[in-house]
Image: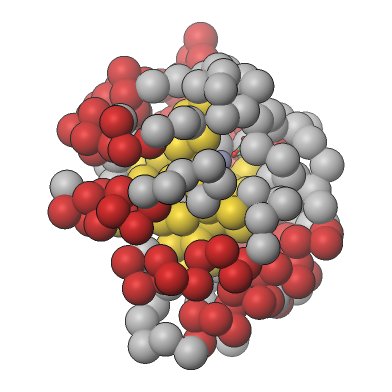
């Protein structure tokens, strides 16, 4: 039997007028982490939240904060996010000439470093940074918005990353993000992903947050 999956609800689809209740609810119903999608309007077309929101999430919950930076020059901002309470900081491979150094700095500042791959970026791009990361995030939509259609073609990339990790002697989590539902979860779980980000299928589940989280857990056992 496989280990229990990690569920990281993305607050991008939360009701921000009731953020405290929404966070309490995901915590109460078994979320493992809280995923915070940071977008700067440059790296991706959307603008979302910054360290200020991370600070409030920290105040509201003891769950680890899984901060996904979709921003240009992440090296200029990692300290602010970690000071605000980020436990895990994931930066993107694309357009980032300093990834190795920035990942090391995330670790030195006391957070878990993660590296993300957008759909158009091959797994081979991260080969040389695997030794300094705790997590690989394989995007299963184009970064920028919640509610997009999951790309099943990314399953193969997860399998490739999984093979790359097996050759190393360290634990590295594979996280997937984008269009994760009870339907899309099983094949990508089988390919090696063990952490699942979900915004729409949790916060907008027709029967509420509890059912959204439960559906993903049940799907991981199927
Ligand atoms: C997309 C973000 C995701 C997004 C997921 O750029 O990184 O975390 O919020 O949303 P859903 O689960 O709705 O695809
Ligand atoms: Zn994300």
Q: Residue 173 at x, y = what percent?
A: 46, 68
Q: Residue 121 at x, y = what percent?
A: 66, 55
- Residue at image position (53%, 42%) is 95
Res 26 visible: no
Q: Kindly indicate the quadrant of the structure image that contains residue 63.
A: top left
The colour scheme of the drawn protein is secondary structure
Viewed as shown, does residue 61 lie left or right of 121?
left
In the image, residue 114 sits, relative to residue 86, either above or below, namely below
- Residue at image position (63%, 44%) is 198
**Residue that protrudes farthest toward the front in the picture:** 97
Q: Kindly indicate the quadrant of the structure image that contains residue 157.
A: bottom right
Q: Which of 192 and 221 is in front in this view?
A: 192
Res 166 visible: yes
In the image, residue 197 sits, relative to residue 38, either above or below, namely below
Viewed as shown, does residue 136 lie left or right of 123?
left
Viewed as shown, does residue 200 lie left or right of 134?
right
Q: In which quarter of the image is the C terminus?
A: bottom right
Q: In which quarter of the image is ligand 2?
A: top right
- Residue at image position (67%, 63%) is 122
- Residue at image position (39%, 21%) is 50
Q: Residue 146 at x, y = what percent?
A: 69, 32
**Residue that protrudes farthest toward the top in the picture:** 17
Q: In which quarter of the image is the N terminus?
A: bottom right
Q: Residue 74 at x, y = what percent?
A: 38, 36
């Amino acid at each position: 039997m496989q280990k229990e999956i990690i569920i990281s609800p993305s607050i991008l689809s939360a009701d921000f007028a009731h953020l405290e209740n929404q966070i309490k609810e995901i915590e109460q119903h078994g979320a493992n982490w809280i995923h915070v999608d940071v977008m700067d309007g440059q790296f991706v077309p959307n603008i979302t939240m910054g360290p200020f929101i991370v600070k409030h999430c920290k105040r509201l919950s003891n769950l680890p904060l899984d901060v996904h930076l979709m921003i240009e020059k992440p090296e200029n901002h990692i300290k602010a996010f970690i000071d605000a309470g980020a436990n895990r900081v994931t930066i993107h491979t694309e357009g980032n000439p300093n990834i190795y150094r920035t990942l090391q700095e995330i670790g030195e500042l006391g957070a878990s470093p993660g590296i993300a791959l957008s759909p158009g970026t091959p797994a081979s791009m991260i080969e040389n940074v695997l030794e300094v990361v705790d997590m690989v995030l394989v995007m299963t939509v184009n970064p920028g918005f919640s509610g997009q259609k999951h790309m099943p073609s990314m399953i193969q990339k997860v399998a490739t990353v999984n093979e790359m990790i097996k050759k190393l002697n360290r634990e590295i989590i594979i996280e997937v993000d984008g269009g994760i539902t009870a339907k899309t979860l099983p094949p990508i779980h089988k390919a090696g992903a063990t952490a699942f980000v979900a915004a729409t299928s949790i916060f907008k589940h027709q029967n509420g947050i509890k059912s959204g989280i439960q559906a993903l857990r049940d799907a991981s056992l199927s």
